[in-house]
Amino acid sequence: LSSSGCEMCTQEGFQAKRSQLVGLLVSGSLEGFEGVLDWLLSWEVLSWEDYESLSVLGQPLSHLARRLLDTVWNKGAWGCEQLMAAVQEAQADSRPLELRGLWDPHSRCPARDLQSHRPAIVRRLYSHVEGVLDLVQERGFVSQYECDGIRLPIFTSSQRARRLLDLATVKTNGLAAFLLQHVQELPVPSALPFEDAACKKYMSKLKSMVSAQSRFLSTYDGAENLCLEDIYTENVLEVRTNIGMAGPPQQSPATLGLEELFSSQGCLNEDADTVLVVGEAGSGKSTLLQQLHFLWAAGRDFQEFLFVFPFSCRQLQCVAKPLSVRTLLFEHCCWPDVGQQDVFQFLLDHPDRVLLTFDGFDEFRFRFTDRERHCSPTDPTSVQNLLFNLLQGNLLKNARKVLTSRPDAVTAFLRKYVCRELHLRGFSEEGIELYMRRHHREPGVADRLICLLKATSALHGLCYLPVFSWIVSRCHQELLLQGGGSLKTTTDMYLLILQHFLLHTSPPDTDPRGPGPSLLRGRLPTLLRLGHLALWGLGTCCYVFSAKQLQAAQVDTDDIALGFLVRAKSVVLGSSAPLEFLHITFQCFFAAFYLVLSSDLPPTTLRHLFNCCRTGGSLLARLLPALCIQRSESKESSVVAWLQKAEPHNLQITAAFLAGLLSREHRGLLAECQASEKALLQRHTCARWCLARSLRKYFHSIPPGVPGEAKSMHAMPGFLWLIRSLYEMQEERLAREAVRGLDVEHLKLTFCGVGPAECAALAFALQHLRQPVALQLDYNSVGDIGVEQLLPCLGVCKALYLRDNNISDRGICKLIEHALHFEQLQKLALFNNKLTDGCARSMAELLARKQNFLALRLGNNHITAVGAEVLAQGLRDNCSLQFLGFWGNRVGDKGAQALAEALSDHQSLKWLSLVGNSIGSVGAQALARMLEKNMVLEELCLEENHLHDEGVCFLAEGLKRNSSLKVLKLSNNSITYAGAEALLQTLERNNTILEVWLRGNTFSPEEIETLSHKDTRLLL
């Protein structure tokens, strides 16, 4: 602030830095903003009327900040300078108080002196406001009603002090004179409450507790503790941006490091306090929070927070009794040994120094609502109402919150209270390799594992989720012994880890090469008891199991010793060592195992599992005919009830596992464990029928195409899970039958969380389509590994859209290598990825060899003049391309020259975009020469370059000999009136051009009016 203060003292500088000032004023708390008002009021920069308009309760802090800037700006340069000084004074408010003699306690104008010394008086009153309120009420200066209004629980101690001073300003009964005298007699605190001994002791205890909980990373099976610092591997963390907003072309989503979690980039709601981190099950959300806690406790990062309180949503939902904020923080996180009231008051007074983290909101059984407001930090309420009001900011406003969740559990209602949303995409290819090396430091082991993964495409595609990388790491001996070629599906991986755990508890001479019927059969009772517990937990939204619940499920110590149930990571006070499954996906796997192998359930029970994926309606609409339940106490009716009440995203995972277990590959193994092979075949038939029926129903719901347009379908996440289940079953015939009814020309799966595993499933199904389809996968997590999974369906793709998918040169080169063999593929959209000059040679070969290729869009990548020159070689040999998008790269003049020369005689290109490529007059001259020869190009986009008047004059000359160009876009190119005049002379002779865009150039209002009258084709 101090470095830029001078330039802000002028009104012009002040206005230019307005957005920066707004951010500064709202970056702290309302407490800090009111501190700035104290100084401005004391210096008489603000009148009393100004102050009242800026102290309206319930207004968003950002609105108040903007109103303050408007008020101060209207007071001239002096007012702007005083605001900067007030901000600096408020930021330096940690000085010890030395206040005696600053004011006359017997002043003849006490109200004026209260205002003149307001910052100091507020600080003196801070620790004594409750006693002073009692005293002024006792002496009759204020009524009970006025006192209650000041003591509302939404106000901090400083805010109560200010409201008492505000009241003294308007009262004429001697209250101002009394306060002026009495406040000076109050004892002077030695320092701000940051130095309070009780707070310091509590901070130390909290840091020690958080450090102990976060320093070691327990593996999923709890078998070992690894130092988090040694093995933590960063995931791809991206900022969610508002798509579809007006403005320049969208850049790729910013990839952040964990330390940037609270940066202002990608702000969705500047008045909100909650950062939302979403990611699929197993993407590493809990580990990310653990790393945050560790960095804070170790003093390495996030030190702007004095207190960090970690919570688990699956633990919180077990709390039945009402909670207050105080109870939540002290009884369910960390108890202060001394000064509980002082510590809690400090937290209320300085919420901006507090961080609360809530892990696993998708496992919280209550759906978010903002209907019931609760504003008192001391009054108890239900745990869900307490959490919802914390997230809304009705409680501990300005305290930061971090919430993690799977995407399906996040509603539009919740997003209203989110300041920024981050997507955890899982490991990059480099991240997978780093993970393996950090977990296997023995010579050669990591290298062999990495080679195995790279040679096994399907297995490599699964490992982008950390939970699968853990399975590979944990089962590395079995994988290296038998190879990973047979592992394709999620079910394969979970059967592998099941084998690993069974072998771990089996005699040493057991064959490690396969689970074997005898191994499964011997532990079948244990696996069924665990499966029954898992299914009951899904149906009741219970993910943490008490000793009583384990006993009721007949789960004994031998069952627990198998290793799939581990001690809960954080324990709610008063519970006795609860247990939980290794991960939510393991709970779903065991639930599916029970549904497949339980002899008490008829096959028709499975219909209710697949009904959760029903499309064309609400996922909550899972009710079955009343005849199915009829108040029966049978096991079947209980299971049906659990399936009806379970969360949809958990049922989808369970359905996929069930399909995998019933696949032909695994059915033989399970049949050895099943007394009735007939029952197993019936379950397979039922699951197969359910999948086929659900997909047919989905396809029949597709509306007819608009006349003249291609029939399209925008798939919902439920459709994707049906495809995942189809893939898990691995039946080519079923896949062929299933997609037979898909009669569309354009299939959209944007924002559907498509990763490499989903790409494998899509390719497995779509390769059987009867007619070509345009496949749109924009805004997903395909990556290079996912591109490789899509290769089997390239033969039925006539267009492939892969915007914002974190794809690099390696993935695209692999894609093009296969695309050269398929005539159907005619369009590629690859903007907003990580492409460089390294892929240019493959692109050039694509253009040169595919003479039916129509569109190539490479915008917002990292291609320079070197890549443009290589690509130009392919353009010279191409005679079919109609659309070429190069916006947002860095081709410069040299690249523009190469492309212009290649396109001079091109016979098909209609649209060329070189927006934002740092092209100057030299590149414009080359493009002008191209326009003299090319009589096919209809639209040329050159916005956001450096053409200036010289470049525009070159283009104007070229257009004099051109008869095809209809639209020329030259916005934001520093063009003056002279350049526009050159264009006008050309337009007099050229009737083909319909529009020339000139917005954002250097024209005065008068020049704009003159030019628009001269030719309406100039868009100014």
Image (tube, grey):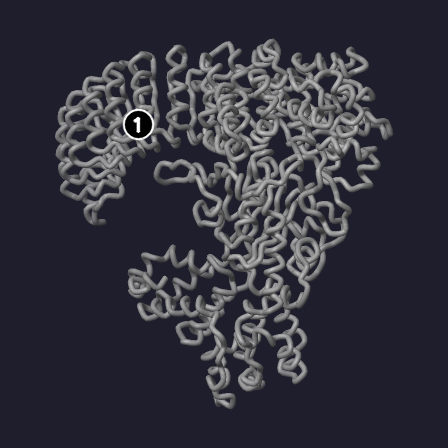
Q: Position of residue 754 (x, y in %)?
A: 52, 28
Q: Is residue 533 above or below residue 358?
A: above
Residue 987 in sight: no
The part of the image, by quadrant, that contains residue 615 is top right
Check disc 1: other Cα within 10 Å, few if <14, some if 14-19, many if 20+. some
Specify the quadrant of the image occupied by residue 778.
top left
Please state the horizontal and vertical placement of residue 3, each as a whole percent of the image: 32, 62
Task: Left or right? Give the position of 321 relative to 724.
Answer: right
| Image quarter of the C terminus | top left
Q: How many marks?
A: 1
Dot 1 lies on which element? Answer: helix
Q: Which residue sits at x=80%, y=13%?
A: 676
Where is mark 1, residue-wise?
Answer: 837
Q: Looking at the image, which residue is at 70% across and 29% down? A: 622
Image quarter (top left, top right, bottom left or bottom right) of the N terminus? bottom left
Please state if 717 lies on the left or on the right of 37 as rendered.
Answer: right
Front residue (pair 2, 576): 576
In this view, the residue in front, 930 or 306, is 306
